[in-house]
Structures are given as structure tokens and as C-alpha cells.
Image (spheres, helix red, strand yellow):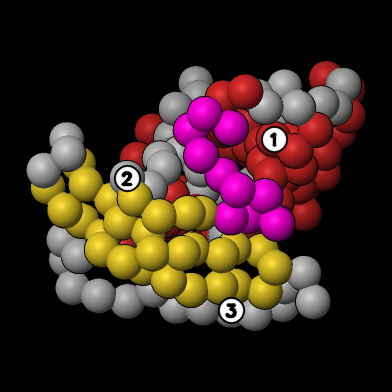
Amino acid sequence: MEMIFDLRNVSYSYLGRINTLKDICFKVNQNEQISIIGSNGRGKSTLLAILDGRIYPTVGEFHAFDNKISEEVFNIIKDNEFRSYFRTRVGLAFQNSDMQLFSPTVFEEIAFGPMQLNLTLGEVKTRVLEVMEMIGITKLKDRSPHTLSRGEKKGMYSHCFG
């Protein structure tokens, strides 16, 4: 069974003084599901940011797909095969969809992910239009994501990213 994530004594401190995580250890293998629960301010979002490769442990080791992940390694391998491999398998959808919106149109918002996969523009356009048709939001393609109702945003993100 392929190992997806392996955290070994991971700790994280913001600004080197605000401890958010301390000695976190766990593994996630292929086809396993986990839940991360805890009260507000206990580091759940920080842990998810580490798993997404957006921040790196202050202490400890983070391995993904049998590769040690660190800021130095991830920066060195930006254009490398592993980074592409990692990004096609790991993504993060924010709980509050407004925090995730950054494109001028719904079409471009959905196209962002496929654009990271080294597809041609034609392939991206085809995939996005197929997905929009499949989930019934083609009429929203030229709208700004910020103008969508809460229900429209939730539907778009749960179908496309969740």
C-alpha cells in the first residue's frame, strides 16, 4: 500500500515564538481516510497547510509519496517531475469558499487547476466546459465568482474541488 503522508514529530511555530503544532506524528496510506478535529486555534489549518506543501514544519519531518518535503527541497524541485506529481495529487479547498476565490470569472476559477497540469489551452477549455455542463453551471461561466450567491459558490466548489 502506497504511503501518502508521513509526519514525524512535526512542530510548527509562527514567527518562531507562537507554537501551533507540537510533536505531531501520523501516517496516511493510500485508500485511508482521516479526520482532523479540534477546537478553534489548535492548528488544524496549519497542519493542512503543511500537508499541502504551502508551509513547512519548524521541527520534524514531513514525507509525501515517499519523498521528504522541505522548503529547500520544494524550491529546488519547482520545475521537477515530483513537484508536478505532488500538485496533481494534493490540493486544498478552503472551508470558506470566499477565501479561495481569486480569478475574474467562474470559468477561469475552475480552469486554474487544469492549467497546472501542463495541458494545452484547448484541453483546459474542453475539460472546464465539460465539468461546467456536467454540474449545470455553464450559465455562470462569465460571472465573477464574488457575485455568486453562497449556494452557487458552495455548489461550484463541492463539485469541482471537494
Residue under label 1, please give it.
83
Sooner in the amino-acid sequence: mark 3 or mark 1: 3
Whether residue 28 is visible: yes
| Nearest to the observer: residue 105 or residue 37 | 37
Question: Circle 2 sits in a helix, a strand or a loop, which is it?
Answer: loop
> Tag 3, which secondary structure?
loop
Q: CA distance from mark 2 to mark 1?
A: 21 Å
CA gap, disc 2 and disc 3: 26 Å
Question: To which residue does mark 2 refer?
Answer: 58
Q: Amino acid at mark 2?
A: Thr
Which residue is pictured at 75% across the width and 27% down the height?
80
Magenta range:
63-74
Determine whether the residue tagged by mark 1 lies in a helix, strand or loop.
helix
Mark 1 burial class by Cα count in 10 Å: few <14, some 14-19, many 20+: some
Q: Nearer the viewer, residue 99 or 59?
A: 59
Give left or right: position of 157 versus 84.
left
Q: Are marks 2 and 3 in contact (CB under 8 Å)?
A: no
Q: Quadrant of the N terminus?
A: bottom right
Q: Whole-percent x and y of residue 6?
A: 56, 65
Residue denoted by label 3: 33
